[in-house]
Image (tube, rainbow, N blue to C red):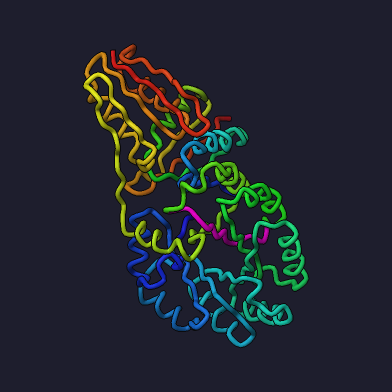
Amino acid sequence: MLALSTEVAPRRSLEDLDRGCRARGLDGLEVVIAADGDADSVFVRARSSGARVVALQTARIDAASAPAIARAAADLGVPVSVSPAAVDPDSLAHIAGAFARAGARLLLGCHTNLDEALELVLAVRAIGTPAALGLAWELHPSSAADLSEASALLLATRELLGVVRLHGGGPEQRDQDGYGIGPLFVELALSGFAGPIVLCPSSPEMVTRWTQWLGSRGSSGCGHAVSTREVELDVRGVEPRHRLETIMGAYRMLVPGATLHLTVDHDPVCMYYTLEATEPERSFSFQVVEHGPEIWRAEVTKR
Amino acid sequence: MSQIELDIRLVPPREKHPAIFRTFDALSPGQAFTLINDHDPAPLRHQFNATRTDQFEWSYLESGPVVWRVSIGKRG
């Protein structure tokens, strides 16, 4: 399940954010309770907006505020995450008790650092309310260090992991290329993790980009014909969901004998199989002339 | 093992198909996973047909317009 944190556009209404999520195919929202906010008013906003709330995040929690936050979480049926730095270790047991009584779950944020993760796992186990306490993984997929420790972290925290907060994705997705998020998602899937993966901006400076991203669904093709016989098409800037139609559209426009020079950022072998399956036999030739690892070029000639 | 969901939407293009085939290859015969994508993974199906001929089951659980879910199973 993919969700969006309200951090991406803190000033937008929940209705508005949820509409943006639907347009982008995201499954719901993580609503952030700000340091000066209170859980009751966040609960009222969440309920009255009708938005699909899948998680809460709170900037702070203490023994006094815990019962109201736990109640809001239980009523919405979602977990709450918090940075362990915002929790006084001496009151953690008391806070966990409030969550256990409300039937809610508090998730302590954990960076991709195995020592930190093991310490948190021990702290959570020591309190002994497994249903009321868990972990939220704060993942930075544009950091090579983060992804190299990811497997070990997943193994160590698996049973306690309730949410993955992914600092990136959306308009930052291209910045993550090359750090190995693909294999990580395979491991996450094979481990049976079914909780929300919440997209958050990687830094406050990114918020403007996220707000724009949420408001736009467009993509731009950038194919152009050099001549009627040689057509250049670079689909790297085209969103993946528009690529097949862009490439097939360009191919179908070719006159017999013309060549499509295709530039992509993945192995184009799937395009070969697609042409083979959809076009008449022996109607084209397909040659990969540059083989990655970052850029692939293929020449497709219509016979 | 509980149900396996591979959401490929966040994975950069060049890692998408390798990640999907890695997940498929890790399945036991008879097991399936749900692939989630933001477009119809038709080219992938052609690639499965060519490279995993007669080894897979393919069924659409949701077909857009925003999200596609496909159950991909390994034949027993």
Check the picture and name the quadrant holding the C terminus of chain A. top left
Residue A50 visible to the viewer: no
User: Which residue: 36% across, 59% down?
Assistant: A214
Q: Which residues are magenta?
A: A159-170
Name, please, the residue furthest toward the front.
A226
In the picture, measured across the screen, residue A150 lies left or right of residue A32, that is right
Question: In this rendering, would A114 be left or right of A135?
Answer: right
- Residue extending farthest bottom: A64
Rendering quarter of residue A157: bottom right
Q: Position of residue A118 (x, y in %)?
A: 75, 61
x and y, in percent, of residue A150 in the image: 65, 50
Observer-nearest residue: A180 or B24? A180
Residue B35 picture location, percent across and down: 48, 42
The answer to which of A145 and B29 lies nearer the viewer is A145
Q: Position of residue B50 (x, y in %)?
A: 47, 22
Q: How many numbered callouts?
A: 0
Give the image quarter of residue A43. Answer: bottom left
Q: Please, is residue B16 above or below residue A76 in the view?
A: above
In magenta segment, residue A168: yes
Q: Residue at x 61, y 60 (%)?
A: A137
Is A283 magenta? The answer is no
Q: Is residue A177 visible?
A: yes
Residue A190 vertical position relative to residue A69 in the rendered view, above or below: above
* Residue at the spot 55% in from the left edge and 60% down from the top edge: A165
Q: Is residue A74 above or below residue A157?
A: below
Residue A190 sits in which quadrant? top right
**What residue appears at the point 46 percent right and 59 percent down from the top-left corner?**
A3
